[in-house]
Amino acid sequence: MAKTQNQRTQSEKGAAKEGARWRRRKEARPSEIGKAALECFAERGYAASSLDEIAARAGVTKGTLYLYFPNKEALFKDVVRQALVPRIAAFEDRVLASEPAARQLENLIAAWPDIMANPHLGVIPKLMIAEAGNFPDLAKFYLEEVIGRARRLVVGILRRGITRGEFRPLDPDAAFFSVIAPLLLAVLWRHSFERHDVSPIDVAALCRTHAAIVIGGLAARKEAP
C-alpha cells in the first residue's frame, strides 16, 4: 500500500533525526576516544596501554579508532593538546600587563589544585616523567608544547616583575624551576606515596604556602631610610 503524504513526511523526519544523531555521534567520537585513552594512560601508563583496550573502553572498534588516530603516539599527543594546552592558553589570556606580577604568579599557582582534582588529568606530568626516557619523541613534544609554553609564561611574569621593581634582581630562567618544582612534587606524591601516607596531601594548602614563600622571596628589598 502506498504511503500517505503524512507517513512520508514522518518517515523523512525520522530519517533526518537519525542522520543528525549519527553526525553528532561521529563528531563526538574523537573526544570519547581521547577520554578513554586518558583513563587508560592514567591507570596503566603509556607503554602498557594498548589501542585495543582504549577502543574497547571508548565503545568503538579498533578500525574506527584508526580513522581518527594513526597510532598511539598521535592519540597521546591529542590527549595532551585537549587536556592541558587549553589551560595554559587560558592563563596566557588572563595575564594582563597592568596587573601586578605577584598577583599573576599567585593566581597561576592557585590554579594547580583544579588540575590535580581531576585524577586522570593530574597524572599526565607524572606519566611524562616516568615515560620520557623510553619515548624521546613524546618527551620532546611535551617539552615544546606544554613545559616550554608554561616556562615562557612564568619567566615572562618574573621578568616583568623584575623590570618594574616588584621583584628583586635574579635569573628568571633559573627561578622558573623554583616556582614549578613543588607543584610537580605534589603530583608525584599524590600518585606515588600518598596511598602509603597517614594523611592525604592538602594541595590547596601547599599551593597557598608555596605562593607565600615564593612571592615573599621575590619581593624587592626596600632600602632602610
Image (spheres, grey):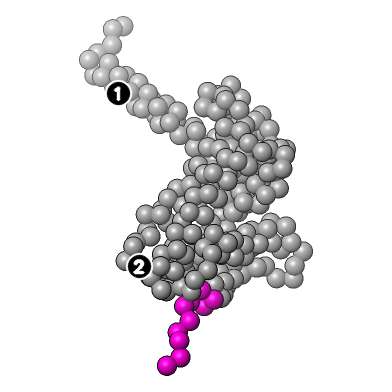
The disc label shown at residue 13, or none: 1
Q: Percent x, y for residue 37?
A: 60, 38
Point out the image quarter for the C terminus.
bottom left
Nearer-N-terminus badge (1/2): 1
Query: Which numbered tag is attached to residue 99?
Result: 2
Distance CA(mark 1)–CA(mark 2): 55 Å
The quadrant of the rendering that contains the N terminus is top left
Residue located at (24% from left, 13% from top): 4
Question: In the orientation shown, which residue stands out farthest toward the top?
Answer: 1
Q: Position of residue 115 (x, y in %)?
A: 53, 57
Residue 83 can be seen, yes or no = no
Q: Which residues are magenta?
A: 216-225
Residue sitting at 49 percent across and 66 percent down? 110
Q: Position of residue 144 (x, y in %)?
A: 54, 44
Q: Amino acid at mark 2?
A: Glu
Residue at 51%, 27% (x, y): give it: 68
